[in-house]
Amino acid sequence: MGNLLRLFSVSLLLLVLCFPASSQVSELFYPGFKDVAANLTLTGVAETEKIGILKLTNDTSRLMGHAFYTSPFQFKNKTNGKAFSFSTSFAFTIVPEYPKLEGHGLAFTIAPSKDLKALPSQYLGLLNGSEIGNLSTHIFAVEFDTVQDFEFGDINDNHVGIDINSLSSNDSAAAAYYKDSATKQSINLKCGKPIQAWIDYDSAQNLVNVTISLSSSKPKIPLLSFHVDLSPILEEFMYAGFSASTGLLASSHYISGWSFKINGEARALDLGSLPSLPQPKKKHPSLTIGLSVSAIALALTASSVAIYLFMKKIKNSDPVESWELELGPHRYSYQELKKATKGFRDKELLGQGGFGQVYKGTLPESKTQVAVKRISNDSKQGLREFVAEIASIGRLRHRNLVQLLGWCRRRGDLLLVYDYMENGSLDNALFDEPKTLLSWEQRFKIIKGVASALHYLHEGYEQVVIHRDVKASNVLLDNELNGRLGDFGLARLHEHGSISSTTTRVVGTLGYLAPELPRTGKASTGSDVYAFGALLLEVACGRRPIEPKAVAEELVLVDWVWEMYREGRLLDVVDRRLNGEFDEGEVVMVLKLGLMCSNHGPIERPSMRMVVRYLDGEIEVPRDLRGPRRLRKGDHDPEAAFDDLMKSYASSSSFDKMSLSSNRDMDASFASHSTSPLSLLHGQTRQS
Ligand SMILES: *[C@@H]1O[C@H](CO)[C@@H](O)[C@H](O)[C@H]1NC(C)=O
Ligand SMILES: *[C@@H]1O[C@H](CO)[C@@H](O)[C@H](O)[C@H]1NC(C)=O
Ligand SMILES: *[C@@H]1O[C@H](CO)[C@@H](O)[C@H](O)[C@H]1NC(C)=O
Ligand SMILES: *[C@@H]1O[C@H](CO)[C@@H](O)[C@H](O)[C@H]1NC(C)=O
Ligand SMILES: *[C@@H]1O[C@H](CO)[C@@H](O)[C@H](O)[C@H]1NC(C)=O
Ligand SMILES: *[C@@H]1O[C@H](CO)[C@@H](O)[C@H](O)[C@H]1NC(C)=O
Ligand SMILES: *[C@@H]1O[C@H](CO)[C@@H](O)[C@H](O)[C@H]1NC(C)=O
Ligand SMILES: *[C@@H]1O[C@H](CO)[C@@H](O)[C@H](O)[C@H]1NC(C)=O
Ligand SMILES: CC(=O)N[C@H]1CO[C@H](CO)[C@@H](O)[C@@H]1O
């Protein structure tokens, strides 16, 4: 009997030990967020407002906001490792600052930590680049995304998706609800009105349902119904809450009510009784009705005074036109940028790019470091197109592109504001006697990054974006030494005439120029691949594509590498400074790929999609290469190509100017080179 009692108390103790959380909360019901601050952990810019609304972000660029219930929930039965069912419902509102430009979105999140080390913009504050797809990440999220990110294969800029350890959704659909099984009604996520969402996970059926609606009655048919067993993804104790972020495009993200329950249906929320956002102060029609004529006159005077003061404030910039206001978030004031760069001091000059000078700056308010590119003497004519183009470039986003943060114009100057890259350009890192030499591992990572960015430009965006000026000085290195491609899209601006060509036509940079370019005058994805090939060889060999100082045979890098390859001495071309410390397989692959990309025939070159697959080791490069410079019958005559090249340069006002505007480094080379630049050109088109 006593034994039995002991057994009983021991098992009771065990039970208590096994379920220390039995007293734990397994249900939340917040019809508004008044006085619950103590039970929520807010990070980033998230805050609860007096009226009882949770504000995750405001409409400033590149913010993140997180709100998690302070204690973790038990999501899993430890004994059998099976995830519990759960159910949640909440109301959110997305208010873009400008109707057509909004970003990025919010997500209901279940995470192992309340303190997510994540990125804003397309990462939604959920993940950072390094964890994507890693099974040990343990993130489950349902995203409400208002920007189409091609990097993650988003279907459009108004969708709902289920994300598991990644931002590439496992299932997604355009935002909508089913009125009945036959009619689907679309919903605009950023309509500025509260939208109610329901997320239900049934652990018996292994099914996640996601439903949204503009009213509190839950549509019978869910928008998404995704089969997945969350047991391996969820840990025993996890935090539940919300994450939101803004990017170049920004919206305010609000949650006005939240209900959550483990193993049961979340209590219903009533949209009507939740706190509502203050109405925008812009229009008050009821007010105007009562206004007398004199009051209107008074209002007019007041507003013209206000406008006058406003104009005075921005007197240093051109008047703002209405269509420009639509791009508000990206537009910096000239004063701000002038202050940031200490008045465009020479000391802050980072370099001279293809289109203008680049200054280092620190934005006065946020203290973030930026690079400001100043393009002088733009042609006024294409201004509107210019801004449209800036908006378009601003939508290009990939972790291996240097992000465009904003712009400003003032009289003849256009200023573009980019993320500041701490580690300078690849060109500097390879050739300017850097303190530490890039290891092969670092070089390989940089190459892969650039390949992925270029692939994105060629295939990931609505339109094909041709970079036109891929070269080492346009590859910048961030603080983790990731390669990031800069200056993308500028060539297009130039083509549209939005940047006037007083700086002469920029056709690319010697040594990276595909041989067909001067003949056809048409840049293509193939000519980008050619330039990328030159970059590959440059990085592996630690030599510039054309080295004026080298002995005659080594003048053109690709010729030299090809020759060594034919002689079976490929490894002899590898950068000596690496002291033989490299992965032989990788180096050989990169060199062969460089030769393949340098093929004279554009169609013989691999696409960037293939290049990425080669670099990822998904497919192997051919054992034997066909001569990259061998011309086949029907191909053009290289001498004629050379003549064309000369003609095209002659059409720009002067040869030196062309080189000046396209590459600082080549300038230096020209300056120190005793023979005429023509011999270099000849070297490049010369038949081997
Ligand atoms: C806050 O948390 C405490 C303990 O976890 C709980 O007793 C209390 O009811 C919670 N308050 C709200 C408003 O949820
Ligand atoms: C948005 O929030 C950030 C951080 O709290 C703040 O610095 C910024 O001024 C806010 N912007 C607006 C428009 O309220
Ligand atoms: C966990 O699983 C075990 C074994 O299937 C079961 O006996 C127990 O009741 C479960 N506990 C909970 C809290 O569901
Ligand atoms: C990415 O997130 C993980 C997990 O939160 C963290 O350990 C890591 O430090 C983060 N990396 C960066 C670069 O922030
Ligand atoms: C996944 O993350 C863990 C811990 O953060 C790390 O140890 C592991 O190397 C990562 N795996 C991959 C494939 O990146
Ligand atoms: C979800 O997507 C991620 C990344 O795309 C993938 O690794 C994972 O296998 C998918 N999971 C399921 C259950 O489909
Ligand atoms: C999910 O939706 C399906 C209909 O598509 C329904 O049969 C199922 O019961 C739903 N499950 C939950 C947990 O709501
Ligand atoms: C600006 O461009 C015009 C022609 O568009 C030219 O006449 C003028 O000299 C240029 N000014 C500067 C400072 O380059
Ligand atoms: C190679 C190199 O320059 N690395 C630097 C990159 O930037 C980080 C952060 O500023 C430095 O710590 C590295 O030394």
Image (cartoon, grey):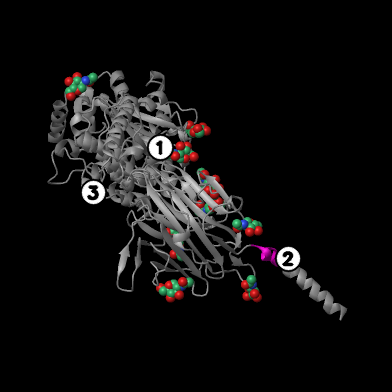
Q: Nearer the viewer, mark 2 or mark 1?
A: 2
Is residue 17 in view? yes
Task: Classify 331 as above or below 59.
Answer: above
Label 1 vs 3, first from the N-terminus? 1
Please state which of residues 378 and 79 is positioned toward the viewer in this rendering. Answer: 378
Distance of label 3 from label 2 (alpha carbons)? 68 Å
Q: Residues within 10 Å of mark 1 (few under 14, many from 20)?
A: many
Measure the C-alpha gap from mark 2 to mark 1. Answer: 62 Å
Q: Would you name the residue on which mark 2 appears?
A: 17
Q: Is residue 517 left or right of residue 245?
A: left
Q: Residues within 10 Å of mark 2 (few under 14, many from 20)?
A: few
Range of magenta residues: 17-24
Q: Give the mark nearer the N terminus: 2 vs 1.
A: 2
Q: Residue at x 58, y 51 (%)?
A: 35
CB-based contact (under 8 Å), mark 2 and mark 1 = no
Image height of 381 relative to 110, above or below = above
- Quarter in which the N terminus is drawn: bottom right
Q: Which residue is mark 1?
A: 574
Give the residue pinned by disc 3: 604
- The secondary element bearing badge 1 is classed as loop
* Type of the residue with mark 1: Val
Upstream in the sequence, badge 3 or badge 2? 2
